[in-house]
Image (cartoon, rainbow, N blue to C red):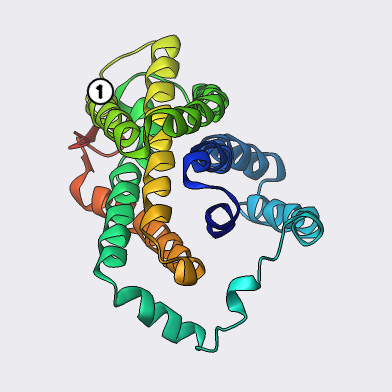
């Protein structure tokens, strides 16, 4: 994201962010069925983690070979990295932006981890349906997020965030209040939710980059990523404390 901020002009960042965010969207949806398949195939929960470790090797080579280093902003930079983080937090607009990113990610990850078990326990879908649902959602999200990136450049980040964010709120209400549904309905609803929940991150990131001090963009985006990862851990914890089971192995309660 810091590289996008340095390389792309503000009016062209939406498309670039859309390309990057679509990879996150696909990973968060397709990753689940792939991980389950690896674990079941090799009869070990370690298999997905080993696969990720192996996959990073060619990625590291490509990153080293292709990505620009962009070290020009460090010519006059003598502060310790921790002091750069302190400098980021001293600017109120940065703090507001970081809280903004925390709430966006939290709003997504209180819901996403429990969609699959909710579909199985409450909506009549089988375990074999889940990879199909998530694969379809990931496929369409890849294109949907890129489309939202293009629209962000065309109509502005703030307007597109309001549209995608409102849609994500509505679809959250739908996906958490379902009863018995067929496979096609599950695919359509999950895809709509994933496209909007992931798509709103594109204009949100564009707004974040706009608010960042260029001299502190790297440290700022590192903190933003930290906020996102914190939310991915905190969200399921909050949901787990709220939700329950009607009886052992029965329908989940309090998902809405």
Image point 22% across, 44% down: which residue? Answer: 243
Residue 251 sits above or below residue 228 on the image: above
Q: Residue 34's image quarter? A: top right
Q: Which image quadrant is residue 54 in?
A: bottom right
Q: Quadrant of the C terminus?
A: top left
Q: Residues within 10 Å of mark 1 (few under 14, many from 20)?
A: some
Of residue 243 and residue 197, the one placed in the foreground of this image is 197
State the residue at coordinates (25%, 18%): 179
Q: Left or right: where does residue 33 sit relative to residue 176? A: right
Say above or below: 94 vs 126.
Answer: below
Tell me if residue 219 can be seen.
no
**Vertical position of residue 74 compared to residue 54: above or below:** below
Observer-nearest of 149 and 124:
149
- Mark 1, secondary structure of its residue: helix
Q: Nearer the viewer, residue 9 or 85?
A: 9
Q: Position of residue 216 (x, y in %)?
A: 46, 71
User: Left of 57 or right of it: where is 158?
Assistant: left
Task: Answer left or right for 156 relative to 166.
Answer: right
Give the percent coordinates (x, y) of residue 41.
70, 39
Residue 181 in view of the camera: yes
Image label count: 1
Q: Residue shown at 78%/54% (left/top)?
A: 66
Q: Is residue 72 left or right of residue 129?
A: right
Is 149 in front, or is 49? 149
Quarter of the image holding residue 139? top right
**Where does residue 178 sit, x and y in percent of width and height?**
26, 21
Q: Which residue is mark 1?
A: 174
């Amino acid at each position: 994201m810091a590289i996008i901020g340095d390389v792309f002009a503000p009016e062209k960042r939406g498309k670039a962010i859309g390309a990057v965010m679509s990879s996150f969207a696909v990973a968060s949806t397709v990753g689940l069925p792939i991980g389950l398949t690896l674990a079941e195939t090799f009869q070990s929960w370690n298999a997905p983690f080993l696969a990720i470790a192996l996959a990073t090797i060619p990625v590291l080579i490509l990153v080293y070979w292709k990505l620009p280093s962009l070290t020009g902003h460090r010519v006059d930079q003598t502060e310790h990295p921790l002091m750069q983080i302190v400098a980021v937090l001293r600017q109120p607009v940065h703090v507001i932006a970081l809280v903004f990113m925390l709430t966006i990610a939290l709003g997504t990850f209180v819901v996403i981890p429990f969609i699959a078990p909710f579909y199985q326990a409450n909506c009549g879908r089988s375990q074999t349906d889940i990879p199909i649902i998530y694969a379809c959602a990931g496929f369409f999200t890849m294109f949907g997020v890129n489309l939202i990136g293009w629209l962000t450049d065309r109509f502005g980040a703030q307007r597109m965030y309001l549209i995608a964010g409102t849609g994500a709120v509505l679809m959250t209400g739908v996906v958490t209040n379902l009863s018995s549904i067929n496979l096609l309905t599950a695919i359509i609803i999950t895809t709509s939710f994933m496209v909007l929940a992931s798509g709103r991150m594109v204009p949100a990131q564009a707004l974040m980059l706009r608010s960042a001090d260029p001299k502190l963009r790297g440290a700022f985006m590192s903190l933003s990523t930290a906020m996102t990862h914190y939310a991915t851990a905190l969200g399921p914890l909050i949901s787990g404390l709220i939700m329950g089971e009607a009886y052992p192995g029965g329908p989940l309660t309090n998902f809405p």
